[in-house]
Image (spheres, rainbow, N blue to C red):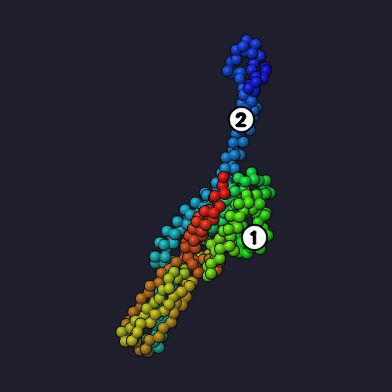
Amino acid sequence: MQVEPDGSFVGEEQARAGRVASCYVLTLSERRSASVHPKDQALQQAGKAGARARAESYQEKLEWARKHLDALDRDVSTFVTSDAYAILRDFNSETGKGVCHFSVKKAIPLDWSLRVGDIVHNMRSGLDALVYALALEHSGEPTNEDAINIQFLICDTEAEFRKREARRHGRMSPAAQDGITFVQPYKRPRAGYRNELAVLRDLSNIDKHRHLLPSFIAANRGRITIRHPDAPIAIRLPIRGRLVDRAVLGTFALHPGMDELDVEYESNLTLDISFEEPAAGNHGIVSTLRLVDIYIQEVVLAEMEQYFR
């Protein structure tokens, strides 16, 4: 067998006869390919496919979180507009004093803690997967040790960020590293508001060790209006904050001797489901996670996806 000028291999008999049978002609690239066992080729292709899948996993994680947040939103809306609660009143006609209580008639479903944890986990790990994808593109497949160190940092101070950035972000391009700096909480302060990434980080840290517990909350600045035909003005009791079973919503007083049957009660209370943990503030679970998702889509991804080649 001899090598032709174009790098082909030609069978000796065909070369002597001056006739080259196509089945004997192999280019160098084909020869290299033929030298790889089919099983090894399959492993190589699987490795490339696996790398692509890992690079794209941040999108899948974030989409999964959004899909399950939509489902939770529907369930929360249905729950808080059902007969999940009642407002009870105790009125003493002899003293004219009364108390209004919040009464839980239907407990918040236990699996909501798990569902919220799943959403938070996929949002947080989706950011880590985004950094992994950018590191994979810039520096290639990392070792197991390097892969463990890759993380999307979320820091409240520049000092904390600078201390950790080389280890967590060092495999990304310099431009991508600058991009993550741009979206950090300490770079985007807002008076009176916690940054959405900081909220996500804190909720994720809590969920790693225990359930994120949901609780009732007054979603509006609701009130109970109390009227009596003999009273000159109506009494309004403001309702704010977290609500637990038998919580006192307010007390009121009418003239002694007024008949309870003549007292009219009206409430415009709108309920929501919030976190018991202070990390999210006094806001609903769904609205909190919606704001986090919007920040990820409109700030983080808008900044970071431009660094993919």
The percent coordinates of residue 161 (x first, y second) are 64, 60
Q: Is residue 44 above or below residue 207?
A: above
Q: How many marks?
A: 2
- Residue most extreme to the top: 17
Of 5 and 193, the residue lying toward us: 5
Using the image as rendered, state which of residue 58 and residue 186 is in the foreground: 186
| Residue 76 can be seen in this image | yes
Helix, strand or loop at mark 2: helix
Q: Where's residue 307, x and y in %?
A: 57, 49
Q: Residue at x 45, y 71 (%)?
A: 218
Check residue 161 in the rendering and tell me which mark sits there, or answer none.
Answer: 1
Which element type, helix, strand or loop, lies under badge 1? helix
Q: Which three-letter amino acid code belongs to the residue tagged 1?
A: Phe
- Mark 2 crowdedness (10 Å alpha carbons): few <14, some 14-19, many ≥20: few
**Residue 285 location, x and y as percent?**
49, 63
Q: Which corner quadrant of the image does residue 303 belong to? A: bottom right
Labelled disc at residue 38:
2
In the foreground, 158 or 231:
158
Q: Is residue 36 left or right of residue 194?
A: right
Q: Quadrant of the C terminus?
A: top right
x, y percent for residue 232: 33, 86
Task: Identify residue type, mark 2.
Answer: Pro
The residue sitting at 51% across, 59% down in the picture is 295
**Residue 186 position by quadrant:** bottom right
